């Protein structure tokens, strides 16, 4: 495939796909090739193809459905001024996280609120390498939307630095979901992570447990540290001292949506081989909790008879099995709704949004912590 060098790669891919629709090569009602097929043809990453498709959706040429594919619904450009197409908000998520239930639930809340407010929205996927994607992503934001909600995937301190640089360069109003960046003055919508850690620890304390551990990875994230602080507060409130040997705050987190339990299970083996005498564990996330239960089974420990385990998020985790996990249910849909409301107010300069908006969830008790 040969393109004009006057355009950027995302623009070239979009223009070629648009040309195929307008020329009838891809007729109305046909399903266009899959993203994987288009990536191979255009020799580019999935995020570029995803952006091109969303641009076509935004222009009314195709309809995208999560499981059935992308279908052509129009083969002519709408009449009128192009400026009429700019009145939209974007929801941006990591391109490799299609299987993440929480992100889709957040997007659902964002989209449903936009529909009520009669605001057009587009969803865009971005690679986790934000430095690589910054130029094309910022250009797209500046040209096509009035503001954006971003659900980022930041897996390391270095990635967080690159992401901060991208935000500093943006001239478009942005609201973050599930991430607080101190000093950036960027509004964020997060779950009340302190309340989550406190609630799950309190649950185990109320069952009479006194030897309670805390197990986490990605400990550089403020969300994990807030959950850990909630754990500490509950122990102190109960008159119990923290035992350093029962706590593991791992820094490594290499997100693998195809095998989400592989790394947590490896980390959990090291944790369980180190600790002695614990009765229950508060895990920072559900994937970490499922990894812990798998490692416990390998070592001959029964959950919940020998070890009670709790998680946080209440997400469907691929590979997670029995017993059912007691978890802190995060209202992701409400986070999406709140993010839209804050973005809409910022774009229309109705009010100065609070830098941090916290949404509380509630405990869902299942077999992993049963008495």
Image (cartoon, rainbow, N blue to C red):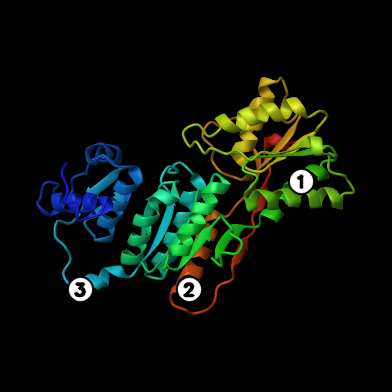
Please indicate, yes or no, whether residue 325 appears anywhere in the rendered image.
yes
**Of the numbered discs in the image, which one, if any, rests on residue 346?**
2
Residue with the most extreme right position: 239
Determine whether, in the image, residue 239 is placed left or right of residue 300. right
Which is closer to the viewer, label 3 or label 1? 3
Q: Are marks 3 and 1 in contact (CB under 8 Å)?
A: no
Up/down of 120 relative to 70, above or below: below
Query: For residue 81, which numbered disc appears in the image?
Result: 3
Residue 322 visible to an observer of this rendering: no
Q: Say whether residue 270 is left or right of residue 135.
A: right
In the rendering, at what x and y percent does residue 312 appear? 64, 45
Q: CA distance from mark 3 to mark 1?
A: 57 Å
> Few, some or many C-alpha atoms within 10 Å of disc 3 (few <14, some 14-19, many ≥20)?
few
Quarter in which the N terminus is drawn: top left
Say what secondary structure mark 2 lies in. helix
First of labels 2, 1 by sequence position: 1
Crowding at dot 1, Cα within 10 Å, few <14 / some 14-19 / many 20+, comes out as many
Q: Tell me which label, 3 or 1, sits earlier in the chain.
A: 3
* Nearest the eye: 320 or 231: 231
Q: In whole angstroms, how far apart are the C-alphas of marks 2 and 3? A: 25 Å
Pointer 1 residue: 201
**Tags 2 and 1 touching, CB below 8 Å:** no
Image quadrant in which you'd find residue 146: bottom left
């Amino acid at each position: 495939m040969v393109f004009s060098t006057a355009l950027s790669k995302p623009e070239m891919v979009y223009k070629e796909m648009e040309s195929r629709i307008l020329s009838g090569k891809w007729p109305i009602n046909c399903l266009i090739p899959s993203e994987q097929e288009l990536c191979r043809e255009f020799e580019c990453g999935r995020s570029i193809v995803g952006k091109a498709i969303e641009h076509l959706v935004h222009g009314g040429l195709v309809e995208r459905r999560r499981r059935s594919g992308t279908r052509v619904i129009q083969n002519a450009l709408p009449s009128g001024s192009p400026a009429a197409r700019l009145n939209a908000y974007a929801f941006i998520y990591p391109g490799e996280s299609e299987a993440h239930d929480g992100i889709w639930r957040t997007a659902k809340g964002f989209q449903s609120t936009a529909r009520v407010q009669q605001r057009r929205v587009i969803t865009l996927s971005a690679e986790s390498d934000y430095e690589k994607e910054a130029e094309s992503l910022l250009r797209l934001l500046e040209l096509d939307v009035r503001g954006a909600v971003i659900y980022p995937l930041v897996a390391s301190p270095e990635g967080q630095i690159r992401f901060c640089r991208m935000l500093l360069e943006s001239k478009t109003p942005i609201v973050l979901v599930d991430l607080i960046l101190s000093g950036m003055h960027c509004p964020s919508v997060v779950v009340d992570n302190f309340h989550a850690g406190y609630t799950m620890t309190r649950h185990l304390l109320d069952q009479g447990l006194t030897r309670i551990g805390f197990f986490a990875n990605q400990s550089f994230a403020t969300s994990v540290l807030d959950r850990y602080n909630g754990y500490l507060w509950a122990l102190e409130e109960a008159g119990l001292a923290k035992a350093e040997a029962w706590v593991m705050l791992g820094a490594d987190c290499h997100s693998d949506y195809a095998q989400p339990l592989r790394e947590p299970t490896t980390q959990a083996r090291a944790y369980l081989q180190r600790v002695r005498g614990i009765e229950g564990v508060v895990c920072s996330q559900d994937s970490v909790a499922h990894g812990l239960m798998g490692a416990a089974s390998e070592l001959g420990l029964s959950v919940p008879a020998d070890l009670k385990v709790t998680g946080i998020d209440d997400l469907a985790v691929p590979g997670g099995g029995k017993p059912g996990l007691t978890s802190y249910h995060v209202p992701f849909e409400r986070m999406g709704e709140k993010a839209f409301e804050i973005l809409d107010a910022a774009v229309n300069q109705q009010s100065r949004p609070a830098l941090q908006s916290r949404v509380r969830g509630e405990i869902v008790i299942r077999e992993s912590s049963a008495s």
